[in-house]
Amino acid sequence: MNDNYIFPFLWMRGEEEEILRNEIGKIHECGIRAICVEARPHDDFCGPGWWHDMDIVLDEARKRDMKVWILDDKHFPTGYAAGLIETAYPERRKWYLADTTVDLFGGVHERTLHVSRMQKPVIGYWQLGQPADEEERKNNRLTALVAARFTDKDRFSPEVVDLTDTVKGEFATFCLPEGQWRVHAIYKTRTDGGNETYINMLDAVSAHTQIEGVYEAHYRRYPEEFGKTIAGFFSDEPELGNTSDISFDDRLGKKGMALPWSDELEQMLKDRCGDSYRESLVHLFADTTSPDDDRCPQMRYDYMDCVTRLYEKNFSSAIGGWCREHGVEYIGHVVEDNGTHSRLGYGPGHWFRAMAGQDMAGIDVIGSQVVFGAPVQTRRSMGGLEVDGEFFHYILGKMGASAGHLDPRKKGRTMCELFGAYGWNFGVRDMRYLLDHLLCRGVNHLVPHAFSMAKYPDPDCPPHFYARGNNGQFSWFAQLMKYANRMCRLLNGGTHVASIAVLYDGEADWTGDHMAMEKIGRILMQHQMEFDVVSQDMLDHPENYNGSFDGNILTLNGVRFETLIIPYAQYLPEGIARFIRECNAFQVIFTDGYPERFLKDRPAPEKPEQWKDNCVCVKYADLPECLKASGFSRISVQPAFEMLSVYHYKKTGQIFMLMNESPDQAFDGKVTLPTTQPLYVYDGDLDRYEILKMNILTRNASVSLRLEPGQSIVIVEGSQVPSDRIASAEEVPWQSFAGQIRECRKRIDLSEGWDISLFMAKDLQAPVKVIHMETLQPISDLEPAFSGIIRYTRTFELDKVPANAYFRADSVFEVMRVCVNGKEAGIRMTPPYQTELTGLLKKGENQILVEVANTPGRDQIYRPYPPFDFQHEAMEPSGMFGSVEIYMNY
């Protein structure tokens, strides 16, 4: 795609043509050669107004040789099908399986239930008068009436009683044995679940409505553009959608939760359960687990396995197949948050199956989900939702990249939607941190969120990168995007190097207690051990992933694994036992315990005997030492540094990306890499390579590095380096920021005597204020609501030209550009705020200009507030202050 790896959201609202074309031009200025149009704010999606605007977008894209992706719905999330369920196909609405209950005591006397009245939810008095579709509720139909015996609190015996045959007309009359019982009326309904205007992922006809309403509509309008200007479609968080509340914990057994349902699902479960089908349904709603009985976890596994296979078949694979038949690609992401990737409600039930039809793996990181320097904190995000930092920091990016690495359809590509809803105070500095965090996990395609053309300030999920010219950091954002494209280019077209596979925890999450896979990801990343997340489907059918076994090596799509780590799970599918038994030379490590049981995953399963002979179990805390003893520590650091993340990639040569993710500690030590080739440092900002000093060991190389907080470095083997990109002769090697300063013998203090001009982002010709500061202090102390560009100028004298020189400012908020004697010396997006001045200084008077841009956050102080807040933000100071110096040698 024109060497482009970025396609930001362009929010379409029906703007005037001039505004629309200008915004695409601004995107083009960033070195970006594709966009993803989003219709969520547009009033006429797939109507005349939409086609009018799309005609303009496609025309401008053609003129600029840009590609266009289309977000595939009018409303968020994907699944509204441009309103067709609501307006044209009410018969395709979702089905749910719901239950209501009554508690009673058994004994010698019969009991009678008014079953027809139990086929709707019970309510509280505070819910009286709330609207309900009572006419449609008349179509609710009983599926099963089942009694479960209480054991303790809200737990029940797995020995249940099917009472369905006692139902006569509107009533059921029966006699239960002595004891306390809960009777479940399990019924099929369209009204008592989630959003009734969305497609049913579990029904092929209903799910196809998404294709009919959006995909076919665009193909009818622009058939000649498919595969040319139109690159493909983007699904945004399609969900099973059986709930209407916001929750990340929609697992089977949740009180009051109706379940996704369809005729096809019902038949699949009947085929699996046989004569016990009706009584087995109660295990989906009641906790009937028992150490000596697996009926509850087995039914929950069967249900979720069928649901997620139908989601894959009817939605993901169906759309992906349609797109490829029409010459375009299919991408997007689902809700992954805090384990939702394997759950109902907002989730798809199984992340890898949800991705199956897509041409890139996809995730999103928005709304403060990843915060630099806070990897394990549980925080509050949009709407007060809890954000599990451990999940987002240690597994989300790795899980996403794993599908990109291992699924041949993805061609090594992993996309991330990023930056959205972090707020106006989230600027280019923090964007750079988040970008490098994702690159260092294997993400290599980006959908920045978002370019909004609304009148400034648009309160909808900022930041907005251009903001009608009101974002003073836009030129730095453009440089960030050029850096991102270079880095994504470098990290495409090769193979991930990871000897460790970690089992995806979706199936374990369906059925019982388990260790979340992010805990394994955390301890591996803290010890610089590379891994990919593999799914049960990959182990069951490696042939679908270009897979093979060769002795003790499992290869999936070119990635060679030497061990599989299985986080503790109370229950696992029998496929794991088969894999261990059949691949007995391959090392398998269980963490913190073996499973209690294996669950049937085939109609006629084999007995999982003798599997323990071919694996080991280690304590979680002992896992790194166990792996090191087995030779799986390919990259090592001295001293130990838990916040140093690594990514190992291979093209013509090996590539190593390292990032110091500590907010306050520098890494200063040695890194041992598995190579003996000459090594270079790749500077993605300047697109150049510098030789790196190294010490050759037996089969490794040791390099000394100092990485400042938040700093990343890319080290490549010499075979990967284009000869025309080497920045300096080999006798002038790469130096750390601290190393550059340390070798300088002369220092000039420029901390005082600056002339300062404040400019609004939209007008860089006429300053709004001019001041002189003898002692630098934050501009926000004087102008707390100012957002824009702050220009600092002063002169200084030199008695001769230095051989090398560096400018350094201690405190800058938050991006900086330095010019000396009318020539640009460089820009900095993150600390340390240090740039090289070598070759720009002269004898006599020198003029220096430092341009600083803060975020638009302070500009919101006195503007009218919207009637809502996604979250609350703290503001940082603005401007340059503290120590400002030039270091040099003659």
Image (cartoon, rainbow, N blue to C red):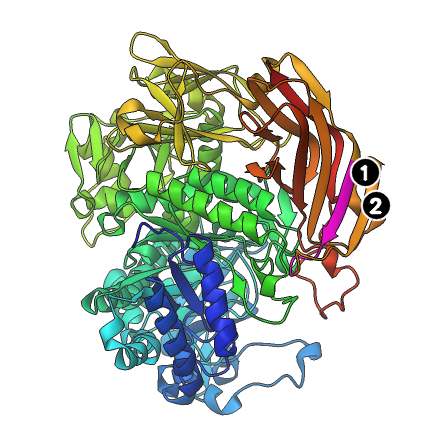
Asked whether residue 7 appears in the rendered view, the answer is yes
Furthest toward the front, the residue is 844
The image position of residue 789, as x and y in percent, is: 68, 50
- Picture quadrant where residue 657 is located: top left
**What's the residue at 78%, 37% (across, down)?**
754
The image position of residue 363, as x and y in percent, is: 43, 52
- Picture quadrant where residue 92 is located: bottom left
**What's the residue at 31%, 80% (across, down)?**
217
Crowd rating for badge 2 (residues with CA inside 10 Å; few <14, some 14–19, many 20+) = few
State left or right for residue 32 relative to residue 556.
right
- Could you tell me which quadrant the C terminus lies in? top right
The image position of residue 45, as x and y in percent, is: 43, 80
The kind of residue tagged 1 is Gln
- Picture quadrant where residue 389 is located: top right
Q: Nearer the viewer, residue 802 or 420?
A: 802
Magenta-highlighted residues: 754-762
Asked whether residue 175 appears in the rendered view, the answer is no
Q: Nearer the viewer, residue 30 or 163?
A: 30
Residue at disc 2, secondary structure:
helix
Q: Nearer the viewer, residue 125 or 691?
A: 691
Query: Decide: marks 1, 2 in contact (CB < 8 A)?
Result: yes
Q: Which residue is mark 1?
A: 777
- Could you tell me which quadrant the N terminus lies in? bottom left
Furthest toward the bottom, the residue is 135
Residue at disc 1, secondary structure:
loop
Crowd rating for badge 1 (residues with CA inside 10 Å; few <14, some 14–19, many 20+) = some
Q: Is residue 121 above or below residue 447?
A: below
Magenta segment, prevailing SS (helix, strand or loop): strand
Q: Which residue is mark 2?
A: 781
The kind of residue tagged 2 is Asp
